Image: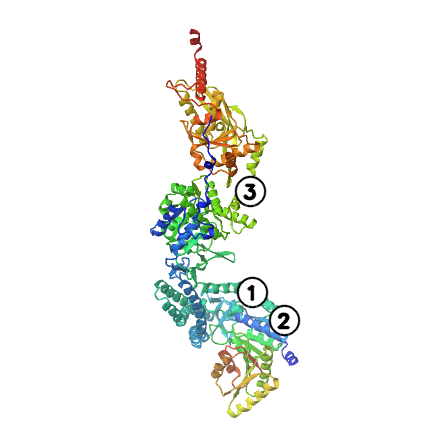
Amino acid sequence: VNTTKKAAIQRILLALDASPESVTALDTATELAGRLGADLTGLFVEDTDLLRMASLPFAAEIGRFSPSLRRLSLPEMERQMRAQAEHMRKAIAVAAAREGVKWEFRVARGSVAAQILLAGMQADLVILGKRGWSLSKRLGSSVQMVISQAQGLTLVLHPGIKFTIPVVVIYDGSEVARKGLDAAGNLVKIKDGNLRVIVIAKTREKSVELQEEAVQYLTAQGLEGKVGVMIEPTKERLAHFLRSQGPVVLPCGSELLVGEGLCELVNLIENPVLLVR
Amino acid sequence: MEYKQLKPTELYHPCEPDGLPFNSTAELGDLDHFVGQPRAVESLQFGIDISRTGYNIFALGQEGTGKHHLVRQLLEKRASSEKVPNDFCYVNNFTETHKPKVLTLPAGRGKELSEAMERVIEEARNALKAAFENEEYQNRARGIAQEFQERQQHAFEELRKKTEENGLTLLRTPAGVAFAPSREGEVIPPDEFNKLPQEDREQLQQKVQQLQGEAQKIMQKMPAWEREMREKMKELNKEITNLSVAPLLEELRQKFSGLPMVVEYLDAVEKDMVENVQALLPSEGGHQQGPGIQGIMAQQMEAATLRRYRVNVLVDHGDTKGAPVIYEDHPNYNNLMGRIEHLAHMGTLLTDFNMIRAGALHRANGGYLVLDAIKVLTQPFAWDAVKRALRSQKIKIESMGELYGLISTVSVEPEPVPLNVKVVLMGPQMLYYLLQHHDPEFGELFKVAADFDMQMNRTAESQEDYSRLIASAVRQEGLRPFDREAVARVIERSARMVGDGERLSLHMQSITDLLQESDYWAGRNGNGKVTGSDVERAVDAWIYRSDRIRQRMQEEIKRGTILIDTEGEKVGQVNGLSVIQLGGFAFGRPSRITARVRLGKGEVVDIEREVEMGGPIHSKGVLILTGFLGARYAMEQPLSLSASLVFEQSYSGIEGDSASSAELYTLLSAIGEFPLKQSLAVTGSVNQHGQIQPIGGVNEKIEGFFDTCRGRGLTGEQGVLIPASNVKHLMLRKDVIEAVKEGHFHVYPVETIDQGIEILAGKLAGERDEQGQYPKESVNGIVQERLAGLAEKQRKFSAPAGEGAKS
């Protein structure tokens, strides 16, 4: 198991900005990297949108805590970004040293999503904080883009929620869902806990069949766990069920879990989500 | 010539063992009354009985007179029939934390309340934990948070929609939000923007500015929304807390329903718990609080919250029987008034009501407090504090350090405790009179004086009582029983201690010491009982241990270093006697007193006074001599001599007038130029009429001269002249009495100077005839003639020269 695990995840990319959710993500990322023996790359993206905005003659920001209008300029925005990047570099250094993880830190400029996707191609796992902006209940556009377009494993973390056990995995019998089972199994082994498999099926007959597969998988892997069944759940029902659970492994590609639908589900729950493709 | 001298039986006032109606102290029961201190006992009983303010007691008397014992016994007897006073507790004052409140509860209930509160705190925390972890609470709390979130999300969603409709995009900046024109989800690059027609640019700018204004409005509303949410949360918390805490406190209120003060306090606790529920909730284990300073701080915050509901039982009378009788051995300010302790916390000193500690006044409240006056007076601030408390009938704890600015820190001002106590101060007489004189408040606060006597009359009955006193002490100290003779010896020794054959010492400490030492010697001698000889041995041993200096002095006299004649006759020289007191031991020694006369103006020069080695009483005695000489011999002519008197070989001060008769004898001898017997020594003061007056330490003085004479060998001529009025004080040593019995030594009781001079000079004193003249050969005659001669010489000498030529 160890060798496959090592082969599976050797490089972790962590997308960072100076927000509190980045700090949560940083802790989880270094812990995972430590347990998996993977290298960690911190990526700080200087958002071109912000830079462009700051270059406009009427650029101004309205403060969150002091609701006044502050003029912005490009040099100032750049200075702020440099300061943030430096702050994160230090944070990653401290966290990585604590876990004994090999790390590097990079700064890129461009569209946030594009840069993460680009860098993510070099990594086995991309970790990003869900830009759970308290002022909006929607996912940030960058996160949406990454979720829907990323190719490998993507872990989305909600601010303040830690990566714990038990791990939940959605299983619908598809190829990607099998991958999901493997990924979930690996996570559980790292965390020494048990696994919950949620079988999603259109019919009861199908569900029985899938349930059997799942049990067989658990037995084969020597994992402890339970298998539950949901027949044709809506996103809301699924989200409601998942809310009370731990980290969720979602196989992308099944009917429920593509494009907008996937984004919506991720948006609805606060659990850490591992997207598998 | 035969002179009156004392018979051996007059030299000692023995206690005849046959007169004592028992064989040993084992037969004697304890005394049912107090011996020898009727005045003190009555004063104490009066003082204890009267329950008026200001009737506190001052027991005055020397150390060792048994004041403590007597006072304690009387107080305890009285206190045992009185009711147990209330408990006092300090509790938090929830409105003014720095002014802790006092709770008064019936005896034992203070502790009960304290324990009950500890349980309530524990149970309340568990109940609250359960209530706050409960699904119902969690859901309601989430609901409130959700409501707030939705409110702001809704506002921003609207804003976002509007932004998009206007072809703009809402951006999150590091510190807030911003707006920018966008195309296909991306912000228009600045160069592209600049290429836009002027009109479009202005339009976009306007739109952005409008949205900025709207965003600002939303942002401005958010604090109010948040406040609203917090209020709602608070209300919810209060509701939940009330449900968990109220039943617990209600139970307590029922328990203490008869005590409105406690019920009021419990109401305040309930109110405070509801308001401070967050602090009351148990934290999720130490690790969640984080390591280091923050963790420690968090733990201490939690501890501090729990402390606020504690009950600090200042005085617990749960196990007390009757009213308390407290003796404070170290009555400094804090031990009397209580103190406020501090805890060093991160470099500062902190305190609260839990750290208030009771003082002796708190413990004695409702009963009696016994204090040593000297100790109270020598402790800074203590005396004033006691008076203040007694006057105001309140105990107010104040920190002296703070009052004087020595420490500056967080402190509390505890509510004063009502005081109802009777204070018994104990101290020497002198202190009582000084306080009466100098402290105007003293008389008002200590109206009862219990005056302890040092001695009691010695009669057959009192000797019997005294025997029982001895028996009690013997039993109390666990000593061997004293047989009849031993008791008689103790009684005799007691009389000797006060230097009076007709009195007994009430200095119980010395008597007890003698009993213990006698018991020791009985043990050494293998006696089952203490016998007379054991007591004698104890006395002798005690003297031997104490008399190194006496012995050294006697040796120096014998060796002729200190010049004392004990034989022959000398003019203008007599042996005086003085007493030296060294700690508890006194002894007498002879001193040579000499006088020289010359022509002069009628003054007697006291050399001791001239060099300021003589005290005022001594000087007074010497001046009296001039009065005597003038009245007796110089009625017709001026007293025309100058005399000088001195204590030879005295290198320290002389005080007292007990040598004034000796000085007069030596003066008369010097004037009359007749010799005085050196085998005699003299003591006694004299008045202007020539009467001899009593002096102190007569026994020691006689023994002192006896020892000197015996050292050189008794000649049978030697003896001492003592005032006749001192005869009743005689309790002389056995060896002196033996010597007198065998005629080797003599004690002459003397009433007048004339009697004394006859013994010393071996001449008649002589009585004045009708012409006012004394017989020529008599002492007075010689002196008179000599003084007349001196006056004549003086007259001639001072007459003007011309006048002399004429005649």
Q: For the residue labelled by badge 3, is the local secondary structure a helix, a strand or a loop?
A: helix
- Please determine whether, in this image, residue B792 is positioned above or below residue B696: above
Same subunit: marks 2 and 3: no
The x, y position of residue B471, in whole percent, is 46, 50
Name the residue beneath numbered marker 1.
A83
Name the residue beneath numbered marker 2.
A101
Q: Tell me the quadrant of the picture where the C terminus of chain A can be found.
A: bottom right
In front: label 2 or label 1: 2
- Please determine whether, in this image, residue B773 is positioned above or below residue A61: above
- Which is more N-terminal, label 1 or label 2? 1
Q: Tell me the quadrant of the picture where the N terminus of chain A can be found.
A: bottom right
Name the residue beneath numbered marker 3.
B545
Whether residue B806 sits left or right of residue A171 in the image: it is: left
The x, y position of residue A130, in whole percent, is 52, 75
- Say which of B656 and A11 sits in front: B656
Specify the farthest residue to the right.
A3
Label 2 amino acid?
Val
Q: Residues within 10 Å of mark 1 (few under 14, many from 20)?
A: few
The x, y position of residue B200, in whole percent, is 46, 71
Q: For the residue labelled by badge 1, is the local secondary structure a helix, a strand or a loop?
A: helix
Label 1 amino acid?
Ala
The numbered mark at residue A69 is none
The x, y position of residue A73, in whole percent, is 52, 65
In front: label 1 or label 3: 3
Task: Measure the C-alpha gap from mark 2 to mark 1.
Answer: 24 Å
Label 3 amino acid?
Arg
- Say which of B702 and B421 sits in front: B702
In front: label 2 or label 3: 3
Whether residue B389 sits left or right of residue B659 in the image: it is: left
Mark yes or no: residue B190 visible: no
